[in-house]
Every structure is written in C-alpha cells, then in structure tokens.
Amino acid sequence: TDPIKYFTLSVIISLLGIWGILLNRRNILIMLMPIESMLLAVNSNFLVFSVSSDDMTGQSFASLVPTVAAAESAIGSAILVITFRIRGTIAVESINCMKG
C-alpha cells in the first residue's frame, strides 16, 4: 500500500484538530477533543512511518501516545472540575482572567 494516502489522512485529521481549536473558543471541554484528534494524527504518523521504513521505533512510540492522551485527559478534567467549583463556569472568557 501507498503510505502517502495514510500520511495525507493524518495531515487532514491534524488540520481538522487545529481548525476545531480555532473555531471553538468558548467551551474548554470541547477544546480538549480536537487535541485528542491531533494526538490520533500523530499516532497514525508514527505507525505509517514505522511500517514504511520497516522499523519498530515508531510502533513503540505509538504505544506510548494513548498513555499521554489519558494523562492529558485526566489532568485537564481535574483542572476543569476545580475551575467549575471555584468560578461556577468553564467558559474560556472567565478562565483567561486567572492570575498565577
């Protein structure tokens, strides 16, 4: 099979993820979903390049991507729950005024 087709598909998924982040800037929970789709695109790139170059390194990295995605979802959800408890909303406009 031709790896260019799969690479093109992963580029399209990645661009849709970027577009999803830029399009929706109101709800931070929905902003996490395009980040997950971009991780999916990176994961498919690892697999395509691993199979096309006949190397196991990309496949080993692809097995680590779901771990990073799960950690990102767990930490992001925890931050959202704490923010909702303190402020009463998870709107991005109210989160932008946080001071560190």
Image: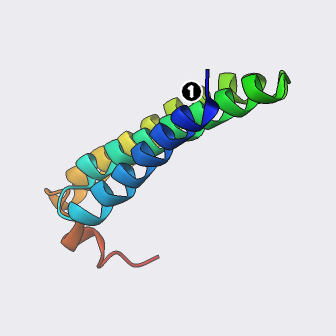
Is 81 placed left or right of 3 in the picture?
left
- The residue closer to the viewer here, 69 or 22, is 22
Vertical comparison of 31 with 22: above or below? above
- The residue closer to the viewer here, 56 or 60, is 56
Name the quadrant containing residue 88.
bottom left
Is 42 placed left or right of 28 in the picture?
right
- Residue at point 82% right, 29% down? 53
- Residue at the left extreme, as displayed: 88
Coordinates of residue 99 in the picture (x, y in percent): 40, 79
**Residue under numbered circle 1:** 66
- The amino acid marked with disc number 1 is Pro
- The residue closer to the viewer here, 57 or 81, is 57
Please identify the quadrant where the N terminus is shown: top right
Name the quadrant containing residue 47.
top right
- Residue at point 31% right, 49% down? 80
- Residue at point 75% right, 27% down? 52
**Visible residue check, residue 72:** no
Vertical comparison of 83 with 76: above or below? below
Vertical comparison of 53 with 75: above or below? above
